[in-house]
Image (cartoon, rainbow, N blue to C red):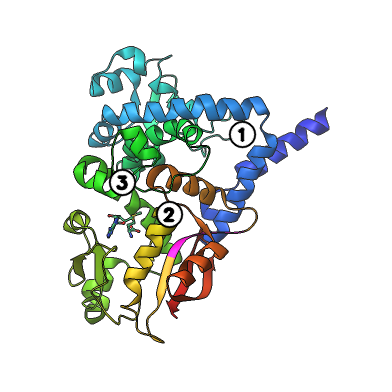
Amino acid sequence: MAGSKKSLDSVIKNLDSIKADDFDTDGDRNKPLLAAYALVSRLETPWETVSRLCMSQPALVASLKTAKDLQLFEKWDSIGNSTEDSDKLTAMVNCDPSLLGQSGALNKFQLQDQNISIGSDSPTSGNKHVLQEVSANVFKPTEFSISLLQPKFGEWINWLYNGSLPSFHKMPEFLQNNDYKPPTNPANGIFQDAKGYKGDLFHYYAEHPREGNSFNQLMDGIMARQASRLDVIPADSFCKWVYPDTAARLYLQDLPGVIANSKCPEPVNKMAHDFFTPQPIKGARVYYMHSIVHDWSEKPAHKILEMLRDALKLGYSKLPIDDHVVPDKSAHHQTTFFDLTMMAFVVGQERTETEFRTLIEAAGYRFVKVWRSPLAPQAIVEAEVA
Ligand SMILES: C[S@@+](CC[C@H](N)C(=O)[O-])C[C@H]1O[C@@H](n2cnc3c(N)ncnc32)[C@H](O)[C@@H]1O
């Protein structure tokens, strides 16, 4: 018994001792993270898995949205993110004390996300709680809750409520009503069913700028996370100080509303362009598309590539397509939920290497190779005009 207790303690101590900054690179940190997810799935019982998925996570995100609506984190930040009791927090956000009190819904934040009580000799402070419970009814913001003050993270909570949850709520019914075939018409998919809207997501966003802004912020968050694997120089230094001549030859293209709100600094050229029309910039060395092709089903994706093809110079221009490239087996969990999100949200999909090859070749390109990085499940498909 004593031997078993000792080994249990040492297992927990070993696990507790692992920290994000133990690793030299993000790629190194990612490997134990994946091992830890696998560990959770081995250790959880079916009851623990189902209650986490169906009870604690929905309750947590509903609590986060309520806290966001109350501007709890913003108001806390304005008084210096100090340690506060629930009476002070209740007064600060002007809600009923029962919400933030001892047994209230919001003060359970710290209990709902990975809080494991493993005894006084085992530290729990490294857990990713939303709030830290300093003592009974006394709380402190955490690195995570403070990160939500940045729109590129905080707006995910609004997007969850205005786009993701309504779409996933509709998905089972939509598929049932459509003989379990994925949608193919970008103007008439699951998102449109959920919103009672006819037209593609990007037209919806142009007509609903508050929701469009949420989406643009979360794209910012995704790009900020991914830039590390591309050896990207921060836009400001690239444009203003490091390579001003090169930056002046770059073009950022998107729909007019997105271009008008983009923060890309001078001297990069900002150009409104509809990619379902011919590409006006001819003979460039590179036409880089990030998170574009996966937004579309075969027919529109083919059209986008076709409209670009004549701009490329044979033997010189390159087309790097930056998206998830799904492996034949053991797809990364991020790839699989991106794939479902693309289907539910934009009638898009993540593609395998074979699917990319077929799409690209049918549009008049040569498939060169796939560039992968250990830092992300996304990859770069290199193509050139055939
Ligand atoms: C998933 S976002 C990716 C944005 C950006 N490339 C990034 O990675 O941050 C897709 C983008 O496609 C743009 N888009 C949608 N339809 C378009 C069209 N017809 N012509 C040009 N851009 C379009 C949207 O406005 C949106 O910014």
330 on left or right of 349: right
| Res. 75 in view | yes
Magenta stretch prevailing secondary structure: strand
Q: CA distance from mark 2 to mark 3?
A: 13 Å
> At x 25% / y 23%, what residue is drawn?
93
Relative height, residue 244 to residue 101 (above, below):
below
Label 2 Cα neighbours within 10 Å, binned few <14 / some 14-19 / many ≥20: many
Residue that carries the numbered disc 2 in the rendered image: 297
Which label sits in the foreground, 1 or 2? 2
Residue mark closest to the camera, 3 vs 1: 3
Residue placed at 39% from the left, 27% from the top?
A: 62
The residue carrying mark 3 has its beta carbon less than 8 Å from ligand 1: yes
Mark identifier at residue 201 = 3
Left-right relation of 82 to 372: left
Say how many tags the image has: 3
Residue 209 screen position, x and y as percent: 20, 43
Where residue 271 appears, as percent x and y from the top left, is 19, 66
Q: CA distance from mark 1 to mark 2?
A: 50 Å
The three-letter code of the residue at mark 2 reads Ser
Which element type, helix, strand or loop, lies under badge 3? helix
In whole angstroms, how far apart are the C-alphas of marks 3 and 1?
A: 48 Å
Mark 1 crowd level (few <14, some 14–19, many ≥20, 10 Å Cα): some
Q: Is residue 217 magenta?
A: no
- Local SS, label 1: loop
SS for callout 2: loop
338 or 99, which is in the foreground? 338
- Residue that carries the numbered disc 1 in the rendered image: 122
On the image, the x and y values in percent for residue 178 come to 48, 37
Considering depth in this image, is 28 or 48 the residue closer to the camera? 48
- Position of residue 346 in the picture relative to residue 272 (left or right): right
